[in-house]
């Protein structure tokens, strides 16, 4: 339960409610989604910004989505393990640090790690040039905050996102060749 309390007080939720979340729109299953999402497990609430896996998938599509989802979460955990190995500052408790300091340390470690990969010729996206990013952050009015909060917690929108992600994962899956059956 403590994790959920931390989540509710986190900058992730506040950024969405205040209108300051990064713009990360995308299409899935032909439908437009104005916000990105975070991968989570079953403990996360059914908010629009969390894609959680299915405990008991009822069909082949949901079972495939669960497999892809869990695989992606493991990849992300592995990335944090690599960062912890390379940058020991991440391993140490930081309860006394401010959120800004924690964020800055994480960004610095990620940037340095990526610079080392690029220098070694092992970068996945070499010479990445980001598009224009708007730096101006406007503060949402009270009415906008209420509307953003209601939108964030809208279960119908969450289920629509999950359905689109399941369909998208299913449509881009790789289907193995059955050359063995032809012999």
Image (cartoon, helix red, strand yellow):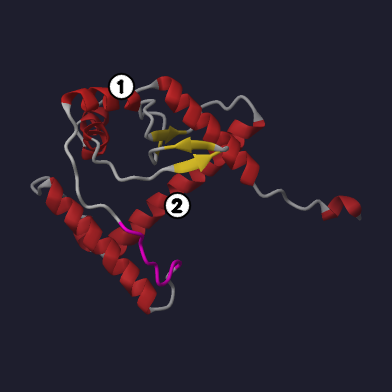
Q: Residue at x 38, y 45 (%)?
A: 24
Q: Picture quarter containing residue 152?
A: top left
Secondary structure of the residue carrying numbered label 2: helix
In the rendered image, residue 117 lying in the magenta stretch gets the answer no
Position in image of residue 56 (x %, y %): 55, 25
- Residue 75 numbered tag: 2
Q: Badge 2: few (under 14), some or many (20 or more) residues near its Cα, within 10 Å? A: few
- Residue 150 numbered tag: 1
Q: Residue at x 38, y 22 (%)?
A: 154
Q: Picture quarter containing residue 104?
A: bottom left
Q: Nearer the viewer, residue 50 or 129?
A: 129
Q: Residue at x 21, y 23 (%)?
A: 143
Q: Is residue 119 visible?
A: yes
Residue 157 appears left or right of 135: right
Q: Quadrant of the C terminus?
A: bottom right
Q: Badge 1: few (under 14), some or many (20 or more) residues near its Cα, within 10 Å? A: few
The segment highlighted magenta reads 124-132
- Residue 55 numbered tag: none
Q: Is residue 94 visible?
A: no
Q: Quadrant of the N terminus?
A: top left
Q: Picture quarter containing residue 122?
A: bottom left
In the rendered image, residue 127 lying in the magenta stretch gets the answer yes
């Amino acid at each position: 339960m403590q994790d959920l309390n931390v989540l509710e007080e986190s900058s992730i939720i506040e950024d969405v409610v205040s209108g300051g979340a990064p713009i990360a729109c995308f299409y899935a299953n032909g439908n437009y989604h104005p916000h990105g999402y975070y991968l989570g497990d079953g403990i996360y609430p059914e908010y629009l910004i969390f894609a959680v896996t299915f405990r008991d998938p009822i069909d082949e599509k949901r079972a495939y989505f669960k497999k892809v989802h869990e695989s992606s979460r493991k990849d992300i955990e592995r990335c944090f393990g690599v960062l912890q190995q390379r940058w020991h500052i991440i391993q140490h408790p930081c309860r006394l640090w401010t959120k800004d300091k924690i964020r800055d340390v994480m960004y610095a470690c990620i940037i340095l790690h990526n610079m080392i990969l690029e220098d070694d010729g092992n970068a996945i996206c070499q010479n990445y040039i980001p598009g224009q990013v708007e730096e101006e952050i406007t503060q949402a009015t009270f009415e906008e905050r209420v509307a953003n909060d209601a939108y964030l917690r809208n279960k119908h929108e969450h289920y629509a996102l999950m359905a689109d992600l399941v369909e998208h994962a299913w449509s881009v899956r790789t289907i193995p060749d059955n050359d063995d059956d032809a012999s």
